[in-house]
Image (cartoon, rainbow, N blue to C red):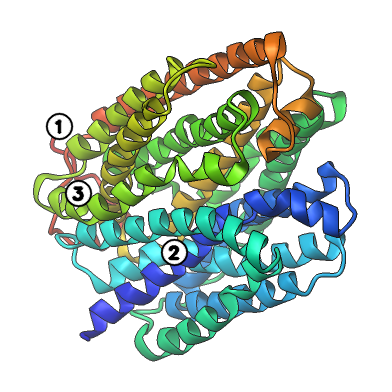
Amino acid sequence: MPNSAMVLFVVVLGTLMVAVDTTIVVLALPTIGEELHSDLSSTIWTLLVYLLVTTILSTQLGRLGDIFGRARIYNSGFGIFTLGSALCGASPTTSLLVLFRGIQAIGGAMMVSNSGAIISDNFSPAERGKAFGYTAMGWNAGATLGIVLGGLLTTLLGWRYIFYINVPIGIAAIFLGFRSIRDVKVRRAKLDLAGVTILGILLVLITYGSIQIASYGVSFVNALEVTQGIALLPLFLFLEKRAQSPLINLSIFKNRVLGYSLFATFLQSTGYLSVAFILIMYLQGIRGFSPLYASLLLVPGYVLASFVGPFMGRLSDKRGSRLIATLGIVFMLCAIGVYFTLNADSPIYMVLIGSTLSGIGSSMFYPANNSAIMANSPEESYGSISGLSRTLGNLGTLTSYVLAITVSSLSVPRYVAFQVFLGTVNLIGGLAQTFLQGIHTALIVSIVILCVALVLSAARGKEVRGVKIEKVSATTQIDS
């Protein structure tokens, strides 16, 4: 196998494993809580800590890849992820499980924050769309496997095996990674400690405060945490403008293609990923389906996206990203339109139609948008921009979770919304109808956010492919 093909294989494998562990825990949460004798609020942190850690660390770890070598950080991340998985499986208490999930998330963040940079190091701008199509395939396949394996392994072998399954795969991937992925043009530079610290603090405040809002509602303390995090953003920007080796070189945003693509990443994640949470709540809470059956109804969309993604990535190499990524958001909006028509008696094929439309949309948006980001990034900042893109995507995912829980729980008590999310309660009668109204309100919020992402995606301009971007000052390549 040629080296570039092997590099792509290892990156796709890493993407698949991280994606698996994003979804595999959801169906096991009730069983974990029961066996470890923990309450709902403690058990759900098994899911949230993974997202919290990857959101906080991705940009910084991407920058470390620029300074110390992307392959070194990526391959080390595989090792930490595998170790964390083994520790999770052996956890005797919920507290230790949450701690070990955090360790696993550190490894996952090291991998995903540098994966885009490694693709860019090993593939020319004219070939990256195809490569990102395969990583999108890995993500969608991983999400599908997570759904299926989470239910099957928990039922047949026990919840610990949803983590143990990573260990033999991880060991093999570590061997392949150190053998095939090599660092390209490592540029020694000072680490922007002030920028790393301030960004970490503001992300902790914003993400933790947002999770508390979703869990317990708005209070003075959690509102203050989010406000303080946002208030630190001007200080971070001030420090970055004056840093000798900034964590994020703000000059990159002079490139409209790059800047708009990054913001589209955040808004698409915020507006669309909440739909999956909302749909699961509808299927479990209103239709009374089991968590496994409800999740399996989403599989057709993931499977379709897995197969179509590489083709769409290849097409974006030839035609550019703007049209394909924008049409992807249009398909996502159409899927939400289908979901908006659902009621307590809707035929299930409507869910499958929506899942199919969403699969087409995600297979178009992700590879095209990621390719646009990396094709318009300066080579010396591949890692930091790849990490920034992942941070924005994770922050959008977290925000979408908060929106889904918060908006839908306006119509029912918050603890009921959590029980519906975990599949431990079914709603009937007037309460189900009231909850359905809350779901429709949450979908309207998602539509509004996605429409803004649509505008940004369409207005990004037409990027120039095949031109190597050497310096940040040479990044304004727009043919609008």
Secondary structure found at label 2: helix
Q: Does residue 143 appear left or right of residue 261 in this picture?
A: right
Q: Amino acid at mark 1?
A: Ser
Dot 3: element? helix
Q: Nearer the viewer, mark 1 or mark 2?
A: 2
Amino acid at circle 3: Met
Which badge, 1 or 2, is on the more N-terminal residue? 2
Residue at the spot x=73%, y=69% of the render?
Answer: 88
Tell me which residue sits at (63%, 66%) in the image.
162
Report the Cα–Cα distance between label 1 and label 2: 33 Å
Q: Residue furthest left?
A: 318
- Is tag 2's residue or tag 3's residue first in the polypeptide sequence? 2
Image location of residue 155, percent across then percent down: 65, 59
Which quarter of the image is occupied by the N terminus? bottom left
Looking at the image, residue 127 lies above or below residue 415: below
| Horizontal and vertical percent position of residue 44 | 75, 46
Residue 17 is situated, as x and y percent measured from the top left of the image, at 50, 66
Mark 1 — residue? 480
Q: Is residue 189 left or right of residue 253?
A: right
Label 2 neighbour load within 10 Å: few <14, some 14-19, many 20+: many
Q: Nearer the viewer, mark 3 or mark 1?
A: 3
Q: Quadrant of the C terminus?
A: top left
Left or right relative to 427: residue 126 = left
Residue type at numbered disc 2 = Thr
In space, the residues marked 3 and 1 are separated at their CA atoms by: 22 Å
N-terminal of the pair, mark 3 or mark 1, is 3
Q: Is residue 228 visible?
A: no
Q: Which residue is mark 2?
A: 15
Mark 1 nearby-residue class (10 Å; few <14, some 14–19, many ≥20): few
User: Which residue is tagged 3?
Assistant: 312
Question: 152 or 337, which lies in front?
Answer: 152
